[in-house]
Image (cartoon, helix red, strand yellow):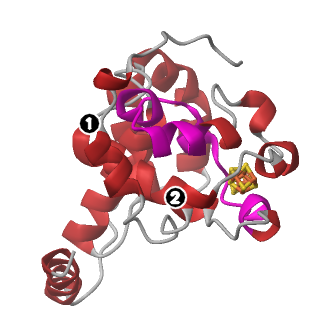
Amino acid sequence: MQTHRKVKYEAELDPSFTKWVSTVPGGERIRECFQCGTCSSICPLSVYMDISPRRLIAMADAGFKEEVLSSFTIWLCASCYSCSVNCPKDIKITDIMYGLKRRAIEEGIFPSRHFAIPILAKAFANMVRKNGRATESRLVVSLAWRVSLFRLLNMAPLGIKLLLRGRLSFKKEKIQNKQEIQTMLKALEANR
Ligand code: SF4
Ligand code: SF4
C-alpha cells in the first residue's frame, strides 16, 4: 500500500511541526532515530500502511506535516508497542502515533473526508463528555450516518435481530453524576 509522494523542497517543509513532534510525550528522542528500520520490520501492520513507521518517523522529524497527518499509518497503528519496545534508541513510536492522531483530529486532517476512525473517535468522545458513557447503538448509527448510509442499510437486518433479542438497545446510557466527568475533562483541557 506504499504510495509515491511528491518530492518537497526544504522551504516547503514545516519546521514548527518538527519542533512540535519533539515535544509530544515520547517524541523527545525522535532526533536520535538513525533509520535502522527495526520498527518497520517488527510492526505487524506495516504491510498495510501507506508510510512505514521508519519512514513516518523520518518524515515527522523533517517537517512533512500534511503527509504525516493525512496518512493511514497513524490510524492503522494498533498500539501493540512492539516498535517502542525494540527501538535501539528508545524512541516511543507508539506514543508519537497517539500524539499525531490527536493533532490530526485537532486540525481536521484525515486520509479522506469520510474516514471512519477519527469520526468514531470524535463521536465517542462527545458522547462520553455529555453522558459519561457511550451508547453503542447510537454510536454505530451516528458513524454510519456520517460515513456511509449504504452500510447502515446493509447492517439493518443484523441490527433488527439484535434488537429483537434484547442484545441491542437505543436507550441512552448515562452515569449519575455527569457533571463530575465534565469537570474532570475541563481540568485536563486547561492543563494541556
Ligand atoms: S527502530 Fe527506532 S531508531 Fe530504528 S528506525 Fe525505528 S524509530 Fe528509528
Ligand atoms: S505500535 Fe503501531 S507502529 Fe508500532 S509496531 Fe505496533 S502497530 Fe506498528
Q: Which residues are magenta?
A: 56-84
Q: Contact (CB < 8 A) between labels 2 and 1?
A: no
Residue closest to the eye, 62 or 152? 62
Look at the image and say whether residue 113 sits in the magenta stretch.
no
**Label drawn at residue 108:** 1
| Residue 52 visible in this rendered orientation of the protein | yes
- Residue 9: percent from the left, percent from the top? 38, 17
- Residue 161: percent from the left, percent from the top? 61, 40
- Residue 33: percent from the left, percent from the top? 65, 54
Q: Amino acid at mark 2?
A: Ile
| Residue 170 visible in this rendered orientation of the protein | no
Q: Which residue is mark 2?
A: 96
How would you rate the neighbour count of disc 1 (Cα within 10 Å): few for under 14, some for 14-19, many for 20 or more? few
What is the quadrant of the C terminus in the image? bottom left
How would you rate the neighbour count of disc 2 (Cα within 10 Å): few for under 14, some for 14-19, many for 20 or more? many
**Label drawn at residue 7:** none
Relative to 128, 44 lies left or right: right
Residue closest to the eye, 160 or 76? 76
| 49 to 17, vertically: above or below | above
Name which of mark 2 and mark 1 comes first in the sequence. Answer: 2
Residue at 49% over, 58% down: 98
Q: Amino acid at mark 1?
A: Gly
Residue closest to the eye, 153 or 187? 187
| 82 to 190, vertically: above or below | above
Relative to 124, 98 lies left or right: right
